[in-house]
Structure formats: C-alpha cells, structure tokens
Amino acid sequence: MTYEPTLEFAHRLDQADPLRAFRERFALPRGGRGEPLVYLCGHSLGLMPLAARGLVIEELDDWAQLAVLGHEHGHRPWIPYHENLRDGLASLTGARGGEVVAMSSLTVNLHLLLAAFYRPNGARRRILIEAGAFSSDRHAVASQIAWRGLDPQEALVELSPAAGTETIPEEAIEAYLEEHGAAVALVLWPGVQYRTGQAFNLGRIARAAHRAGSIAGFDLAHSIGNVPHALHDIEADFAVWCSYKYLNAGPGAIGGCFVHERHDPPHLAGWWGHEAGTRFRMGPEFHAAAGAAGWQISNPPILSAAPLIASLALFEQAGLQRLREKSVMLTGYLEFLLDRLAPDVALITPRAVDSRGCQLSIRIKGANGRGQRVFNALTAQGVIGDWREPDTIRLAPIPLYNSFADVLHGAEALAQALRLEP
Ligand SMILES: Cc1ncc(COP(=O)(O)O)c(C=O)c1O
C-alpha cells in the first residue's frame, strides 16, 4: 500500500475501514479540559469497552439483591463464571476450549505453571529466557530456580541480541538449543517482547525446545489480542497472559493460562480447580477438573472478570483476522509517518510485518535527558504513549479503537516534540 502523510488520506482510510464502528464502542479518554486525547497506549492498558460498565453493574446488582444466592442464581451465576470467558480466550490463543482458563493474574499464573513444568533433572536444569525480559518474568524464573535449591547465576540463561542489534532472530534461539539443549529444562519466551515490540514465531520456538527435550512456555502479555496464536497446533506446553492490555479488561483484570491437553502434571491445588460436580462435598481429596480449569486455585474475581466478557464479544464480532489486517495497515502507516516526519528517531521494532504486532518502539537519540523531554512534549500535545528507560517511547495503534487519523496526529505531534526539544 502507498501511504500519504495527509489528513485527507488518513480520513479516506478511516472511511474505507470495515472495522471503524468498533471505536464507538469504547470510552475514548479525554484530557483535563475535556479535549480528546490520541491514545496509542493499548499495549499497556486497553481502553474500556462501553459494555463493560453494564456487565459490572449487573454483578453489583446481583450481589446487592441476591447476595450469596448469586453464586447459583445470578444473571451469570458466579460458580461457573469462568466458562463465560473460555471460548473467547480459546479463539484468541488458538486453543481447544478445555486448554484455557481465565484465572488469577499473570505472574501468579507463571509461578504456578513453572512450579508444575520446571522439573530440573541432573544436568538438565537451565531455563532459557530473553535478555531484557520483563522484570516480573525474570523475578519469577530466578526465584523458581532458587526455590529448588539451584543457583540462578548458573541455571538462568538470558539470550542477548547479537552485538549492535536490538532483536533476537528465531535462528539464534534454535542455535542455542541445538548446542546446549541437553542442559535446558524449560524455555520461557514472550509472544511479543514488551520493550522492542518484536513478535516471535512461537511454533519455531516450541519445535526447537521440544527437539532439545525441553518444555516450551510462553508469556503472551503483549501478544494475546494483538497477533493470532495457534497454541494447540504448535504444541506449546503452557502459556500465561494478562487481560488489561490488548484484551481491554481493565486495570488488574483477571489473567489467564493455557495448558496443552496432552499434559496432566500434578496440580498445585485449590478448591476451584476441583471437579465442579463434587467440589462442594468439601472432601479431603483433590480431584482435578479436566483441562486448564483444574489449575484454578481460588474462586475468580467476578468484578475484574466481567469487563473481559464485553471485550471478548467485540473480538468475536470484529474477527481476529480482520483486526490483524487492519493492524498491519495502521502500524505500517505509523512506520511510514515516522520515517517521513521523524527521520532522526531509531525504530527498534522489526520492519518485517511478521515480526511485530501493533507496537512500534522508537529510541530517541540525544543526551541529557532529551528522550524524556521529547516524551513529555508529546504527552503535552495530548498524545498518550509510554516511556521506557533509558530512551524508548512505545506507541501502539490498536485496530479495535484507533483510527488512521489518530496515527497521523500522533506522528505529527512526535515530529513537533522533536522540533521543540532539539
Ligand atoms: C511481559 C509481562 N510480564 C509480566 C507482567 C506483570 O504482570 P502482572 O502484574 O499482571 O503479574 C507484565 C505487566 O505488564 C508484562 O508485560
């Protein structure tokens, strides 16, 4: 597609966009004087689907009117509440229904699944992650290693990009596993890297891990709802995610996990993972519910799960494939405009469409805090992205609610910020 850097062109793309009506189904944030903001930060916190309010109020009303009876007699009874989320999550992750469950939160789920899947054995005790992994993932992995009496200095391996590069090609992961795979118990890799925006071919990583005899686990925080997944077909062992970014379920929303149906490792058990039919007999023995549902520990936070129902319905109506097609165009337009209007910033995110999702990460050159000043000048113009130390701005146009005009306004504001802070 040939892009043009004009508002007329952006409006033309918006008018031709078959998904444009979805924007009206979100609360679009405003600044202190009521002015509309250009929101390019859905990679951090997704916008609120308007229908979320009604769903949360419905739960509050059921609680008010039915109290404990809401467990069985609410509009959506609370006992099987997670079932409302199952099909939508399965479709976004490419899973079978029984392989996914909404539960708890990302890092907690990561701990639970590492507890089950990380089985160091003799020389095979390493966990392979990417250098510069999200801090919480690294903390979880390092503490799991230490918890088993092993030394994270030795057993935690962080694969770095080659010197002078920002991203890690799948070949490098494959090469590491080919050479050192016998020492690797588990590979934990992101679907999309949070800082660079690089999207990975998870099938290749899973196959390389399995060839080496290792477990393949994935953190989909930045990829679920952003790029399509096929976790069942690629035979991923497990995956975890949060729902407050691309899934638009609100701050601290319920997380989720995937466990491939071929697995049935011993569960860390709690009553909500017990098979539903006999859970309330309250017997001393744990009988796991089939599939991922058996991994639930506690009864779910209904008020933080309700908005996800609204969001998953929008994904279903829009269709992930169509969203991805629009996303490729939106992010491509942002890339084009940055090259045109802000040529002295460095794009960290891969230019290859298959190696990225919505997000572009740009490094602001210059010393003495210039990057932070440019970011502040961007924010002052009503464009919301985010800042990652020491020098990176992340911007993500989201196909469910961003327009091509948003992208143009965002890029023009960045160009202006760069001029203001030479
Ligand atoms: C890649 C990644 N891992 C872990 C986390 C931590 O998530 P939580 O606080 O929900 O456990 C985040 C949060 O943004 C994240 O992006």
Image: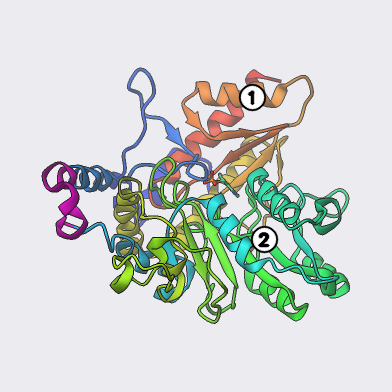
- Which residue extends farthest left? 65
What element does badge 2 sit on? strand
User: Which residue is depicted at the point 53% across and 41% down?
Assistant: 5
Q: Which one is in front, 193 or 157?
A: 157
| Circle number at residue 391 | none
Q: Could you tell me which quadrant the N terminus lies in? A: bottom right
Residue 171 found in image quarter: bottom right
**Dot 1 corresponds to which residue?**
374
Res. 284 image quadrant: bottom left
Residue 186 visible somewhere in the drawing: yes
Q: CA distance from mark 2 to mark 1?
A: 32 Å
Residue 221 % position (x, y):
54, 53
Write the start and end of the magenta stretch as one range: 61-75
Q: Residues within 10 Å of mark 1 (few under 14, many from 20)?
A: many
- In this rendering, would 123 be left or right of 263? right
Q: Which residue is mark 2?
A: 189
Q: Main secondary structure of the magenta part?
A: helix
